[in-house]
Image (spheres, rainbow, N blue to C red):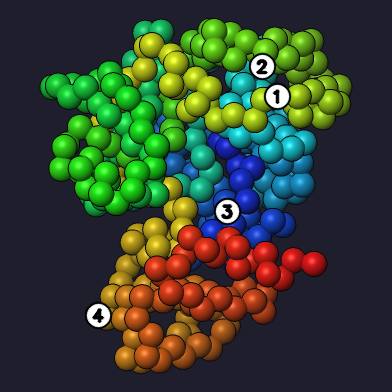
Amino acid sequence: MKNNHLIIMAGGVGSRFWPMSTVDTPKQFLDILGTGKSLLQLTAERFSEVCPRENIWIVTAEKYLPLVKDQLPELHESRILLEPCMRNTAPCIAYAAWKIKAKYPDANLVVSPADHIVIDTTEFQRVLNESLEFTSEKEAIVTLGMKPSRPETGYGYIQAELGNECITRVNAFKEKPNLETAKVYLDNGSYFWNAGIFVWNVNTIEKVFRAFLPEMAELFDKGNEHWFHQIEQEFITTNFPKCEKISVDYGIMEHAKEIYVYLADFGWSDLGTWGSLYDRLPKNSNDNAVIGDNVKLIDSEECVVHVPKDKKVVVQGLQNYIIAEKDGTLLICDKANEQQIGQYGKLFEK
């Protein structure tokens, strides 16, 4: 366990969770679930039996440094890696991996987004520990595949080589499908939701970056003399924007050979939309999900309501709606149109 390290990617904006999530305070820093803890804090806690607290690394945007320090005050500032601009997941992961390798040359790494939720944390921890043991002994990449419960069009899929083992080879990665294709995937049984959580040894990931994203690898090689020194941020500010804007899925996963998937089921959601939050929250007798202490629903069904504790709210006659309020901004939206919510937030931009 001492050699296990966690990289949490916490730089996204989460525009589909507007008005809760904004550019200044994205959803990973919010108490979306009404637990008193942000999604970032819940993510860090989830790995308590996977890696030591001091082996947590956060990659985020420069502007979010105060939020990270406030929510995870025990982290040393050297563990908070600041991106000067958004360049997708491959540069984010490469930066963290190169820095970690400089001090921990044989580290075993888990990469996780900051804004996912997990219901069964005990099973989650078991799956991660088995995956880390696998990648520490074998030059391989393991990604987590979630057993699908519905024909979901909002997730990418992993086609697995089915057998008797939990960890099996990946046959193919599939982009987010249309509904008809998602139904085919569900019926087929060999397709799993891509959770976007990766496990590997630091030497393995360095090798595949050199093979498939060599220019990016060479760029971070130039930082090897700067990690953990004051000049590190200056180097990153100058050089990080030079990285190709590419995801680790496109840049690495679609090309690497030794890729495996752990077929898991621990109550996972990427919490990408209000609808996915609704799916995970407890419901009342009319299938309404409510976060807020003073909410009354009358003749309303299958709604999700998220308002501050001190707000008094009455909802009458709505079905399948999202009602959310933050800092005086109110959203009332049909759940069928939730993919447009990110655009609605832009209506108030100056």
The residue where tag 3 is placed is 14
Give the mark nearest the N terminus, 1 or 2. Answer: 2
State whether residue 333 is above or below residue 130: below
Q: Dot 3, crowdedness within 10 Å: few (<14), some or many (≥20)?
A: many
Residue 101 appears in the picture as rendered = no
Give the mark nearest the N terminus, 4 or 1. Answer: 1
Q: Amino acid at mark 2?
A: Met
Residue 239 appears in the picture as rendered = yes
Q: Quadrant of residue 220?
A: top right
The residue that appears at 69% across and 38% down in the rendered structure is: 86
The residue that appears at 52% across and 52% down in the rendered structure is: 39
Q: Position of residue 24 (x, y in %)?
A: 72, 57
Numbered badge on residue 216: 2
Q: SS at mark 3?
A: loop
The residue that appears at 25% across and 35% down in the rendered structure is: 191
Task: State the separation of the CA atoms marked 3 and 4.
Answer: 30 Å
Numbered badge on residue 285: 4
Q: SS at mark 4?
A: loop
Q: Circles 1 and 2: CB distance less than 8 Å? A: yes
Q: Amino acid at mark 4?
A: Ser
The residue where tag 1 is placed is 243
Q: Quadrant of residue 96?
A: top right
The residue that appears at 56% across and 36% down in the rendered structure is: 8
Task: State the separation of the CA atoms marked 1 and 2.
Answer: 6 Å
Q: Looking at the rendering, in which quadrant would you find the C terminus?
A: bottom right
Q: Dot 1, crowdedness within 10 Å: few (<14), some or many (≥20)?
A: some
Q: Amino acid at mark 1?
A: Cys
Task: State the separation of the CA atoms marked 1 and 3.
Answer: 22 Å
Q: SS at mark 1?
A: loop
Q: Looking at the rendering, in which quadrant would you find the N terminus?
A: top left
Q: Position of residue 47 (x, y in %)?
A: 45, 36
Task: State the separation of the CA atoms marked 4 and 1.
Answer: 51 Å
